[in-house]
């Protein structure tokens, strides 16, 4: 999460490992110890550019308004307003790639802060990679990023 890193799990990972679990702590790109590339030059990894964002409308209730005020619609325009590569889709791809390349099997993700949104997006996009997702202290600050004050947009 914002201001956090994988070290925040340092007391949990040994205990989970003692209980017989394989445990990994992952910093999402742009957070913690991960690389922090210029968000405007991330086309090669920008998950937004590899998806048809309108395809997510299939999850909306039939007849639901597609656009409207906060609380009026289940969906907003889902693209990052600045085209930033730091978005739920990029992070979901990172989670999926980590599971495939490092874990090597379906995984259960325990996600904190903004990682909660990344974990939920990964579960939507890659259900074959995840056994389940547990979210802790979710940060939902980017869910309606187009409705935020422009000074607060990441």
Image (spheres, rainbow, N blue to C red):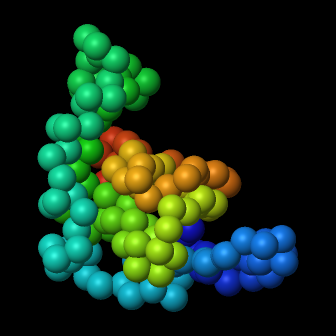
Residue at 18% from the left image edge and 53% from the top image edge? 51
Q: Is residue 12 visible?
A: no
Q: Is residue 31 above or below residue 113?
A: below
Check the picture and name the quadrant holding the N terminus: bottom right
Q: Nearer the viewer, residue 154 or 87?
A: 87
Where is residue 114? Give x, y as percent.
Answer: 52, 60
Q: Residue at x 26, y 82 (%)?
A: 38
Q: Nearer the viewer, residue 103 or 153?
A: 103
- State whether residue 54 is above or below residue 119: above
* Residue 30 falls in image quadrant: bottom left
Can residue 76 be seen in the rendering of this structure?
yes
For this view, does 42 lie left or right of residue 9? left
Q: Quadrant of the C terminus?
A: bottom left
Residue 25, by quadrant, is bottom right
Query: Residue lying furthest top in this view?
Result: 63
The x and y percentages for residue 37 are 29, 84
At a point 26% along the width and 18% down the height, the residue shown is: 65
| Position above or below: 49 against 71 | below
Compared with 63, 108 (above or below) is below
Q: Measuring from the top left, give residue 31's x and y in whole percent.
A: 48, 77
How many badges with numbers are in the image?
0
Left or right, 30 with respect to 20, comes to: left
In the image, what residue occupies the spot 34% across and 50% down? 125
């Amino acid at each position: 999460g914002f201001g956090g890193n994988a070290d925040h799990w340092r007391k949990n990972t040994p205990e989970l490992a003692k209980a017989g679990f394989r445990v990994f702590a992952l910093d999402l790109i742009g957070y913690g110890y991960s690389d922090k590339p210029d968000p405007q030059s991330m086309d090669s990894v920008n998950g937004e550019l590899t998806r048809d964002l309108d395809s997510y409308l299939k999850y909306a209730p039939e007849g639901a308004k597609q656009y409207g005020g906060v609380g009026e619609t289940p969906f907003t325009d889902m693209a990052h307003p600045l085209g930033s590569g730091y978005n739920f889709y990029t992070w979901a791809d990172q989670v999926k790639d980590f599971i495939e390349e490092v874990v090597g099997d379906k995984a259960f993700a325990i996600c904190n802060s903004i990682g909660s949104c990344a974990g939920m997006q990964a579960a939507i996009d890659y259900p074959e990679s995840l056994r389940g997702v547990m979210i802790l202290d979710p940060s939902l600050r980017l869910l309606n990023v187009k409705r935020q004050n422009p000074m607060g947009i990441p």
